[in-house]
Image: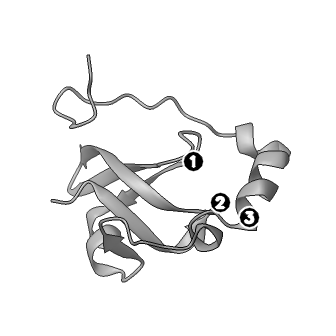
Amino acid sequence: MENYWTSNKSINGLRHFVLVNKINEQDQINFLLVAVVDVEISLKISKDELFNSGDWNEGWLNLPKSLAITKDYSYYKSSNNSKEGIEKIFVKNDSLFNIT
């Protein structure tokens, strides 16, 4: 499975993400994705949403900077919302990104 993903629409102004954890919850598989340029922007999505929604592309698409980092990112960072709801990210032992 690909660890690098590009969102078809910006999420808080960013489109390139890294899959850092696979989470088995009840009867569903979820994934934790973190923005490449800002660890404060992370999201948990279901396997179905990642693979079947049409909202994501495997790998990092080569995008112009203005499309990869949109003006929404500046607005997000300058707003008070950028620090709200930030959860600590714990990378599981079997994650590609565990460097301990």
Residue at 39% across / 59% down in the picture?
Answer: 45
Q: Amino acid at mark 3?
A: Asp
Mark 1 touches mark 2? (CB < 8 Å): yes
Disc 1 to disc 3, C-alpha distance: 13 Å
Element on which disc 1 rests = loop
Instruction: Determine the image quadrant of residue 59.
Output: bottom left
Q: Residues within 10 Å of mark 1 (few under 14, many from 20)?
A: many
| First along the sequence among labels 1 and 2 | 2
Residue 46 locus on image (x, y percent): 33, 62
* Quadrant showing the N terminus: bottom left
Side (left or right) of 61 relative to 38: left
Check the image and report above or below for 67 versus 39.
below
Residue at 60% across / 67% down in the picture?
Answer: 65
Residue under label 1: 41
Residue at 44% across / 32% down in the picture?
Answer: 89
Nearer the camera: disc 1 or disc 3: 3
Instruction: Determine the image quadrant of residue 58.
Output: bottom left
Residue under label 3: 72
Instruction: Determine the image quadrant of residue 94.
Output: top left
Mark 1 touches mark 3? (CB < 8 Å): no
Side (left or right) of 3 relative to 55: left
Residue at 32% across / 30% down in the picture?
Answer: 91
Q: Residues within 10 Å of mark 2 (few under 14, many from 20)?
A: some
Q: Amino acid at mark 2?
A: Asn
Mark 3 touches mark 2? (CB < 8 Å): yes
Disc 1 to disc 2, C-alpha distance: 7 Å
Check the image and report above or below for 29 versus 100.
below
Residue under label 2: 12
Residue 71 locus on image (x, y percent): 75, 66
